[in-house]
């Protein structure tokens, strides 16, 4: 069983951040500080609508309150340690947390939207053999404050404090860690980011990816506010998936797909299955046919992800020709399948490359 050290983002400072708290919680904090309720609502607006990350800059608050907040309740303890810029516009953020641990986030721009890929654990406990993050093992869970703060910090770096993004923002929980092994904090961060009176990022613009933690998939299906769901599958047969995603030994494919089918989907909602393409391992036409048989009848799509290399990983990426042939096999059997183009590979920012490294190793 995986065990985590219990540690909050303020463990070394004694200060509790504002990011991650709901408006009601900030109203309650204002009362604790001897302030009227409207001060809590002002705090909420400053943090989530205006993205003011320094209490001293909250000029609509009294000076004494700003000074006390700076000393006891900073907006966030998450700071940018380093930013790496890709030739395709992607940015990889190496972030410091309040206790000195490091995680990574990725900003991926396209003309119609921005996507921010965020982390949910320091490291990862799942051990996928094609993913560099797994080489870190897991150091600790992240708090809802730390998870949500990544979005604010990245947007402020890209556009400037409080400047509204020119188009929509998508948030994908596909960075470091297995979100469903930190379920409560991840879902609290979802509610924080999607709050209509806060950042107002629609849950339909968020995606949580899991390797298949079945009990949490059932919990997820019962959530009143939930993002889209993506499953990292990587293989259509248990023997191979056991090797690629070892947690499959506990949650095998048949049970995983049964849990997926139990998730109530909205009118236009589909499940996403992510399939990393490994040369000579899982990319044959026969594998594609088996995968199509598994997903037949489901409201689902498949994202085919070229493996992103690292010296520490034992796999090669499938050729584009092989990926396209795999896609044709799926589409020919009625399965919507899309090839995800790598972004940020030259700065170690692509899928499976995040490992909190202070350098870029393409």
Image: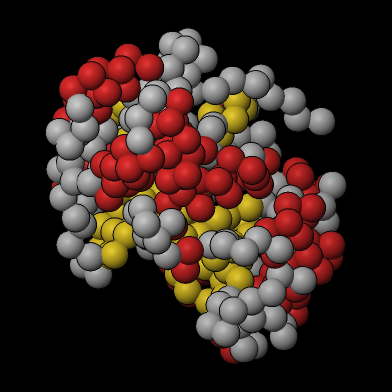
Image side of residue 49 versus residue 322, left or right? left
Q: Is residue 126 above or below residue 207?
A: above
Q: Position of residue 160 (x, y in %)?
A: 15, 43
Image side of residue 115 versus residue 180, left or right? left
In this picture the colour scheme is secondary structure
Q: Position of residue 136 (x, y in %)?
A: 57, 26
Q: Residue at x 42, y 39 (%)?
A: 27
Q: Quadrant of residue 331?
A: bottom right
Quarter of the C terminus within the rendering: top left
> 48 and 138: which one is in front?
48
Q: Quadrant of residue 58?
A: top left
Image side of residue 197 versus residue 156, left or right? right
Q: Residue at x 52, y 15 (%)?
A: 11
> 309 and 213: which one is in front?
213
Image side of residue 259 versus residue 96, left or right? right
Res. 308 visible in picture? no
Q: Is residue 111 above or below residue 7?
A: below
> 14 and 133: which one is in front?
14
Q: Residue at x 23, y 46 (%)?
A: 50
Res. 6 visible in picture? yes
Q: Position of residue 221 (x, y in %)?
A: 70, 64
Q: Is residue 84 above or below residue 66?
A: below
Count the labels in the image. 0
Quarter of the N terminus within the rendering: top right
Q: Residue at x 21, y 51 (%)?
A: 89
Q: Position of residue 165 (x, y in %)?
A: 21, 57
């Amino acid at each position: 069983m995986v065990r985590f050290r219990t540690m909050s983002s303020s463990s070394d400072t004694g200060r509790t951040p504002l990011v991650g708290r709901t408006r009601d919680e900030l109203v309650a904090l204002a009362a604790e500080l001897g302030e009227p309720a409207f001060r809590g609502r002002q705090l909420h607006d400053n943090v989530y609508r205006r993205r003011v990350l320094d209490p001293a800059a909250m000029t609509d608050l009294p000076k004494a309150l700003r000074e006390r907040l700076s000393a006891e309740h900073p907006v966030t303890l998450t700071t940018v340690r380093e930013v790496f810029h890709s030739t395709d516009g992607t940015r990889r953020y190496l972030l410091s947390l309040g206790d000195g641990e490091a995680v990574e986030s990725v900003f991926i721009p396209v003309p119609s939207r921005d996507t921010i890929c965020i982390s949910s654990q320091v490291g990862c406990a799942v051990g996928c053999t094609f993913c560099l993050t797994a080489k870190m093992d897991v150091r600790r869970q992240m708090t809802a404050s730390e998870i949500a703060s990544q979005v604010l910090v990245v947007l402020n770096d890209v556009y400037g404090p409080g400047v509204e993004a020119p188009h929509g923002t998508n948030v994908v929980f596909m960075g470091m860690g297995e979100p469903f092994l930190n379920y409560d904090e991840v879902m609290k961060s979802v509610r924080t980011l999607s709050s209509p009176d806060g950042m107002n990022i629609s849950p339909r613009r968020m995606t949580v990816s899991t390797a298949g933690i079945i009990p949490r998939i059932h919990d997820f299906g019962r959530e009143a506010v939930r993002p889209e769901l993506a499953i990292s599958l990587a293989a259509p047969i248990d023997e191979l998936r056991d090797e690629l995603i070892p947690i499959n030994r506990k949650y095998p494919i048949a049970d995983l797909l049964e849990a997926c089918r139990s998730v109530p989907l909205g009118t236009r909602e589909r499940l996403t299955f992510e399939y990393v393409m490994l040369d000579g391992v899982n990319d044959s036409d026969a594998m594609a046919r088996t995968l199509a048989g598994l997903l037949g009848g489901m409201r689902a799509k498949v994202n085919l992800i070229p493996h992103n290399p690292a010296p520490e990983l034992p796999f090669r990426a499938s050729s584009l020709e092989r990926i396209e042939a795999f896609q044709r096999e799926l589409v020919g059997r009625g399965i919507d399948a899309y090839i995800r183009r790598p972004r940020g590979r030259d700065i170690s920012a692509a899928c499976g490359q995040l490992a909190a490294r202070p350098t870029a190793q393409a």
